[in-house]
Amino acid sequence: MMKRKGLHLVAYMLIIVVLSGCWDRVEIEDRGFIIGSAIDSPEDSGADENAVTMTNQFVVPSGLGGPSQGSPDKQAFANITARGKSLFAIQREMATLSSRSPFFPHLQTIAVSSELAQQGNLFSDVMDLFLRDHEMRREVDVVIVDGKAKDILDIQPENEQLPVMHIQSIMENSYKNAGTLQPLRIGELHEHLLNNSSYVIPRMVKSGDALDYEGIGVFHGNSNRMVGTLNQQETRGYILITGEKDGGKVEVEMDDETVTLEIMNISSSMTITNKSKANIGVDVNTDVEALVAETFGQGRLTSKEKLKDLEQKAEAKMESLMKQAIDKVQGELKTDVLGVNHVLNQYHYDFWKGIEEDWDHGQNYFADASIDVSASVNIQSSGSVDQTKN
Amino acid sequence: MERFEYADNIIGDREIMIAVPSIVIGVGVLSMPRYIANPTIAVDGLMTIIAGGVLVLLLTWLVAKLASQFPRQNFIDYATLITSRPLGIMFTFLLAVQGLMLAAYETRVIADVATQYLFDQTPYGVVGLSFLLVVVYAVSGTRAGLFRLNMMFFPIILVISILVMLLTTGLFEAGNLLPVFKTDVSGHWEALKQSIFSFLGIGILLFYTALVRKPENVPRKACIGMSIAVFLYCLIYITCIAVFGNLVAGNLMYPTVELAKDVQIPGGFFERFESLFFVIWIMAIFNTTAMAFDVTVFALNSIFRKNRKMQLIFLLAPIIYVIGMTPKDTPGVTAFGTFVSYYGMAVTTVITVLLFIVARLRGVKSQ
């Protein structure tokens, strides 16, 4: 009996030891939480040509004061840069450079320099790790940075302690400005890479101490590199064509006075009108709902004719914006980021299969397609006053 | 006062209804969208899942009909009655091997998935061992207890699946579902095989029907249970395609897990939803493995006259472990899974159809 009890005791002791153990235990103090990564081409791309540099932003928890404590003297982040032939090798090297081992599941933003993105295939190569590694999430945002990508991790934001959080807020606020797009999720990027289709990635520029989030980088799917950028005007046109996001503004000149309209809702549709290889006809219809946001002048706006007139002027303005964007991507860049390929694939599958191989490369049927645009604007209200000044 | 006896080893028909989706929904769901999406275009695979589901529903009905003709009789008894004792033993043995291999496969895949997403450093052998030990504990208890465990876990599994789908609706892109009806016949055929394989495990009804209080209800209830699984698969597939698109869904190792990783709860106070999803999905896989193991023990035990349940469990557990841990790498595990699927489907279908026809021809009735 005693012997049996003793045996049980030993068994229980063993259970305690085994059950409370954890093979993969990493103390939270030892984890280096990375919230942002920046990838650049090295300055001296001498001997090893495919080398890249990666800068990771680690959070330094002791630098993050609570709201009542005011701002502590310490910086809340540390940027560590390393260089290597593969990102994984860089990561491992980074573990030797910092006291905490890199931990990626809280990664928010990946910034890639436009210089690197312009080199063929390198961009998708560096994205591989972010898609393959199990620590990565498909929700991470990707942006292109004009100049050095690591610079944007160094900015000193006014009311945020972490530069990456500042970048995130800038991107989240982007819907207020029609010149920008929502950030691209890496999961969507994976879709484009697998599809071999062309795509756009929002672009960020550092000017002094501030960040400008404006314009987009155009990526050619087949050659797998960034082929150009759209400026703010062209981006507006792009958004009107794709209807990718709502919001923004448009300025209309009316009787020498500027009227600013706030765009509430954009819905666009694309239809294929002509299916002949040499001349594919595409119709883009964009419906916009808008409000009068601001007027510089004295005109009354409540009369029906006046609103009609305003709508027509706004339509003309939008159509010219859209044409501007089409001229750029079709004429200059010859890259289909407008989504014509998706419409063809989804609604004209058999025809698409015949031209897929020569769409925006090779024969480039896309460059020969004729794309017609039409916009219709509906102004819902003139705001809370009719006139400001008589 | 009479003491209420839980361990009466008789189960209601609602328990058998839940047992069917419980065994069917296992590790297959985690990778199912990849196998279906690969040979098909856009959301066409949905038709294949439904077609596979209908075929499996037919099989379910046949299995349940056969078993329910012999109330309170073990499989070996009615198989002997229909054919002969040696054939009865052989059929029992073949079906037991199916349960054994299914348990081994489930253990291995959960170990692999857990190693990939949760424990980097822990060897899969250790994860598999601890999982299997818990399964052994469950199987050692009463059979009715196992069914009640199913009843308890299943609603939680349903809720988490639906939650994953609701929380990813923000990422839906309707364009991903187009074009429709463009897949050719060979693509559908390839996907149909995968779809049928993901509904593996219906053979348990051949054994468990003997425990049911009202066997005449079993065919209907089993089909309802199976329909739940088919419906859930359809929902998961549509969600995967709408969120990822066909190409990405066909490219991810475990699309369903990635779906859970994509969930973002508004407000951002809870970032890693997949941890919750994993905990609950391990419950689903636990149910499948425990039932596959238990049905093996049940089948082999019925060959002996004496009750040798515990001996069988301790003999079979190491065998399951060794079989499960034998494949060296992912292709090995995939090949093993394909083998288990082919074997399981072939054995279940052939034995059921054979017994059904012979029983009809010879006019064998329950005694």
Image (spheres, coloured by chain):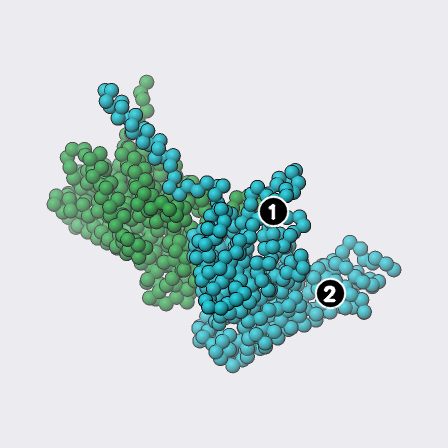
Chain colours: A cyan, B green
Identify the element where label 1 is drawn.
Answer: loop
Label 2 environment density (alpha carbons within 10 Å; few <14, some 14–19, many ≥20): some
Label 1 environment density (alpha carbons within 10 Å; few <14, some 14–19, many ≥20): some
Question: In percent of the image, x 56 and y 63: which residue is there?
Answer: A113
Question: In x, y percent, where is residue A135?
Answer: 45, 51
Identify the element where label 2 is drawn.
Answer: strand
Are the two marked residues, 2 and 1, in contact with CB atoms closer than 8 angstroms?
no
Question: In x, y percent, where is residue A318?
Answer: 68, 68
Quadrant hosting residue A262: bottom right
Tell me the subunit letter for badge 1: A
Residue topped by disc 2: A251
Question: In x, y percent, where is residue B81?
Answer: 15, 43
Above or below, comparing residue B169 to residue A251 in the picture: above
Residue topped by disc 1: A75
- Describe residue A132's horizontal placement relative to residue A62 as left or right: left
Question: In percent of the image, x 83 and y 57: which residue is there?
Answer: A388
Q: Quick one: which residue is furthest to the right in this view?
A: A390
